[in-house]
Each structure stands twice: as C-alpha cells, then as structure tokens.
Amino acid sequence: MRININHLKEMKQKQEKIVMLTAYDYSTARIVNECSIPLILVGDSLGMVVLGYDSTIPVTMDDMLHHTKAVSRGASQSLIVGDMPFMSYHINTEQAMHNASRLIQEGGAQAVKIEGGRNICTTIESIVNAGIPVMGHIGLTPQYMHQLGGFRAQGKSLPVAINLYNDALALEQAGAFAIVIEAVPERLATYISQKLGIPTIGIGAGDGCDGQVQVINDILGSFSDFVPKHAKQYANLSKKISQAVKTYRDEVTGKLFPSREHGIAMSDEVFSEFLKAVE
C-alpha cells in the first residue's frame, strides 16, 4: 500500500519522524522504496548531481518528467513528490496547474513541490483545489538563488525570520500538506514546526522538524564536487566506484577479463558444422 498525505499527518501527530530522500532513476528508486522510505522527492537538484549544472535553474519540465517517470516505475510504496522546476509555475495559475498535472498524469507522481512563500499561495490553492497535493518549500529556495545572493542560510535576522514564519502559516492555509524548511536556524525551524498542523521536512534546519530530507548522492558520497554542510556521508561511493572502474580497466588491458565463466558456450559439434558451412 502506498503512503499518502494522511499517513504523513498521522506521523506528525504521533511524533514519528518522517524520512525523505531524493531519487532520480529507476534503480535508485527501487532500493529506496524497498528500504521503506515514506517519501521520495524527484528533486530539481538533479540538475546539479545528475546533469552537471551549477544550479537548479536550467532544469526544465521535460527533465523533471523524464526522471519522475523513471522513479515512479521503481517505487510502488513510497509517496513520490515531483519538483516543479524554475519558471514552470510563475507565469500564471493556468501554467502552474498544467505543469503540475503533467507530473501527476505523465510522470506518475502523487504530489508536487513548489518553492516560495506567500507569493505563490494563490497558485498552490488552485492546484490543491484541482486535486493535486502540494508540498511547500521555504528558507533557502535554490530557484531564488540570484535574489537571495547565492546559496545562503535564511532566517538569521529578525525580519527574515518573521517573513519565514508568516510564509509557513500562509502555505498551510493555502492547502499545502507539508513544507520543506531548508537552511534555517534550528530554533526557528522548531518553532515553526510546533505551530503548524502539517508536517515540516528539514534539510539543514535541525532536528526539531517533523522529518528530514537529503539528496541521496550526498549521503552516499557519489557526488564529489562538494559536500553540503547539512549532509552526512553514510558511504563513499565515489571512491568505491573509482576503484571498481580502475580494476575493470586493468583487467581488460591485462587480458584477465572476460574469462571463460563470463562467456557463452558453443558445442564442438555445432562449431564444426558452422566451419563447414562458412569455409
């Protein structure tokens, strides 16, 4: 049975921590799903850790649909949230609803995530009224990086802290079923979490949130360009993959691979008949 938004609200009420991870392909989604992770985010972070961009801004709806489809084929129990990429919901409500519906109908997601606060509440309300669950995202919102002056923590000053609190309240009022809080002081994120009736999912916002989300490439150590401060590496796959590739290279050049066990056998009788037929 697939996790749904009611399950998440129940988890908050029972004070059960909610675990969320990103996934961008079938194989990874299948593993995450089998590990009983309630929430899978097909994040526009794929622009950096999969596509090699220096931000999430170049990511398109086609990119998001491509990866969301793959993830939906691999995860049958986790609730899949598809990220709405930059400028896919900013022009007008009709555009936002159309793109949100594509992530659900074509991509196979069960919900969408939208960055922003009170400025996008009208859009969120319309999407929710159309039957599509929406997850909010406040604090460090990567799609607003140019306006924020880069990837910088938010909410350390009084005016910004008050704005974030009011944004969170507005998102809940607009119908969001959960809110990601990114790179916000722990005390502020905890206070916001306690004031909301919907779950908060923190990333770099301390343990006072109702759940946590991480980019899977960060916790596995497969993305080696940089390690975010909020990330903990539970493995170092970059090193292990590098070692495996070098061993493969050396075995091929050293004529050790493939060996007989990796080949397909052909009987002497059939081969003899083959030689007679072609010579």
Image (tube, rainbow, N blue to C red):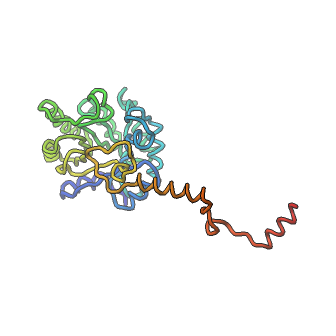
The reply, left or right, for residue 105 in relation to residue 176 is: right
Residue furthest to the front: 254
Residue at the image position 13 percent from the left and 30 percent from the top:
159
At horizontal 65% and vertical 65% (from top left) the residue drawn is 263
Residue 93 against residue 236 in the figure, above or below? above
User: Is the C terminus in the top left, top right, bottom left or bottom right quadrant?
Assistant: bottom right
Give percent across and percent down for residue 142: 31, 35
| Quadrant of image for the N terminus | bottom left
Q: Residue at x 40, y 47 (%)?
A: 109
Residues 216 and 240: in front is 240
Percent position (x, y) of residue 227? 32, 45
Q: Nearer the viewer, residue 272 or 92?
A: 272
| Near-viewer residue (156 or 109) | 156
Tell me if residue 95 can be seen. Answer: yes
Whether residue 20 is situated above or below residue 45 in the rendered picture: below
Q: Position of residue 264 (x, y in %)?
A: 67, 66
Number of numbered discs present?
Answer: 0
Left-right relation of 121 to 223:
left
From where the camera sits, is residue 131 visible?
Answer: no
Give percent across and percent down for residue 35. 36, 61
